[in-house]
Amino acid sequence: MSEEEENIEIARMGHPVLMGVAKEVIDIQSKEVQEVIDDMITAHLQQGGVGIAAPQIFIPLRIVIVQVTPLCALSNGIPETPMMILINPVMEVLDESKQVDWEGCLSVPGMYGEVPRATKVSYTAYDREGHAVKGVLEGYIARILQHEMDHINGVLYPMRVEDLKRFGYLDEVREFLLG
Ligand code: NI
């Protein structure tokens, strides 16, 4: 079966792989780790979300992908961003003020919830070649990184929803809560 045709299974809320603290990657250049990254990219592009974390494909390692895909950019009216592959990421909140916005998750299919997140964060990590990378993120992309960091620490966004009246099925949320 070719890479493109292979449908990569996504872990859903309730599976223990999503509830643990993922392990640091020791050998970034290893064939195993590079294959995990390839599978994450494939799954990310197949699902058309804004990010993915390794535990979501049943691999408890500290690897995340963050990207506003062109499709997502179009449907949400936000700028698309290049794909960031972050290994062993460490994040720091630069601006404690929080904003609420709606989030979904591949591991919580069909649901949508309003989550408070910090507006500005910085990160350090390694790319898939093993080079140190760092940056500062603001706005929606900062939100995505916080969501993915949560994944590698065993936290799913419904655990961060403060007003459960602002959590529900996507079609109902679209009809009654958005706009
Ligand atoms: Ni998620």
Image (spheres, rainbow, N blue to C red):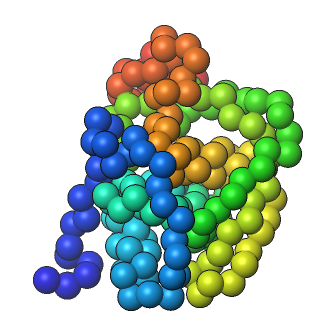
Residue 43 coordinates in the image, percent (x, y): 35, 65
Which residue is rendered at x = 40% and y = 58% of the image?
60
Residue 132 coordinates in the image, percent (x, y): 72, 78
Residue 145 coordinates in the image, percent (x, y): 63, 52
Q: Is residue 63 visible?
A: yes
Residue 78 coordinates in the image, percent (x, y): 65, 51
Q: Is residue 109 visible?
A: no
Along the viewing direction, whichever of 43 and 21 lies nearer the viewer: 21
Q: Is residue 169 above or below residue 85?
A: above
Along the viewing direction, whichever of 40 and 88 lies nearer the viewer: 88
Residue 105 is drawn in which quadrant?
Answer: top left
Left or right: 44 as drawn, with respect to 128: left
Q: Residue furthest left?
A: 1
Q: Quadrant of the N terminus?
A: bottom left
Q: Quadrant of the C terminus?
A: top right
Residue 7 is drawn in which quadrant?
Answer: bottom left
Left or right: 44 as drawn, with respect to 166: left
Q: Is residue 28 above or below residue 20?
A: below
Which residue is rendered at x = 52% and y = 76% of the image?
26
Which residue is rendered at x = 52% and y = 46% of the image?
153
Q: Is residue 32 above or below residue 85?
A: below
Which residue is rendered at x = 40% and y = 68% of the image?
40
Q: Is residue 176 above or below residue 145?
A: above
Left or right: 28 as drawn, with respect to 55: right
Q: Count the marks.
A: 0
Along the viewing direction, whichever of 13 and 178 lies nearer the viewer: 13
Q: Residue furthest right?
A: 95
